[in-house]
Amino acid sequence: MDGGTEAGWEPHRIALLGGGPRAAVTVAVVALHLLGAVETGPRGTLCASGPEPEGLEPFEGTVLDCLHEPLTVRELVRHPDVRLALALTRIPLAEDGLLGRPWLRPNRRSRRRVEFWRGTRCRRSGTG
């Protein structure tokens, strides 16, 4: 494994491999919330708040654009724009051989890589 290519991986890509589309969207929403761009609304909805932060990744930008109307994470995962962004996120993963065919789901290689990243994070933080 080449360490240079892994350093540029966005968290939502890792979440997509490790937990699927809902995990990828959740990671993007949490990142946007930490930037102050998303607030929680009534009945578990999320909504964009304030100006768009600078330097957003394309996936996060798409998620934020969809949150100009209150949506739950479940509705957000089903939104056509988010589904397209997820499909575009899968392309480089498939090119790297991390998604199996025909449904482009994580394969053994991607599961091993996610486990490696989890182990690295635990060793660096001193837990595990």
Image (cartoon, rainbow, N blue to C red):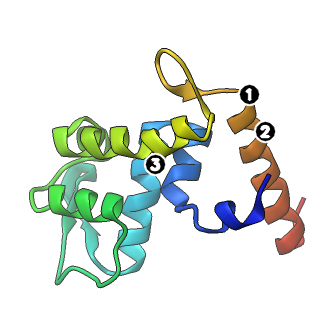
Q: Amino acid at mark 1?
A: Arg
Q: Which residue is mark 2?
A: 112
Q: Residues within 10 Å of mark 1 (few under 14, many from 20)?
A: few
The residue tagged with tag 1: helix, strand or loop?
A: helix
Q: Residues within 10 Å of mark 2 (few under 14, many from 20)?
A: few
Lower sequence index among marks 3 and 2: 3
Q: Which residue is mark 1?
A: 108
- Residue 100 is situated, as x and y percent measured from the top left of the image, at 58, 23
Lower sequence index among marks 1 and 3: 3
Q: Distance between the Cα atoms at labels 3 and 2?
A: 18 Å
Q: Amino acid at mark 2?
A: Arg
Q: Residue at x 32, y 81 (%)?
A: 36
Q: Residue at x 37, y 61 (%)?
A: 29
Q: Residue at x 23, y 63 (%)?
A: 64
The residue tagged with tag 3: helix, strand or loop?
A: helix
- Residue 59 is situated, as x and y percent measured from the top left of the image, at 34, 58
Q: Say which of 76 and 106 sits in front.
A: 106
Q: Disc 1 vs disc 3: which is toward the camera?
A: 1
Split into 4 quadrants, where in the image is the C terminus? bottom right
- Residue 24 is situated, as x and y percent measured from the top left of the image, at 46, 48
Tell me where residue 88 sits by quadrant: top left
Q: Which residue is mark 3?
A: 24
- Residue 111 is situated, as x and y percent measured from the top left of the image, at 72, 36
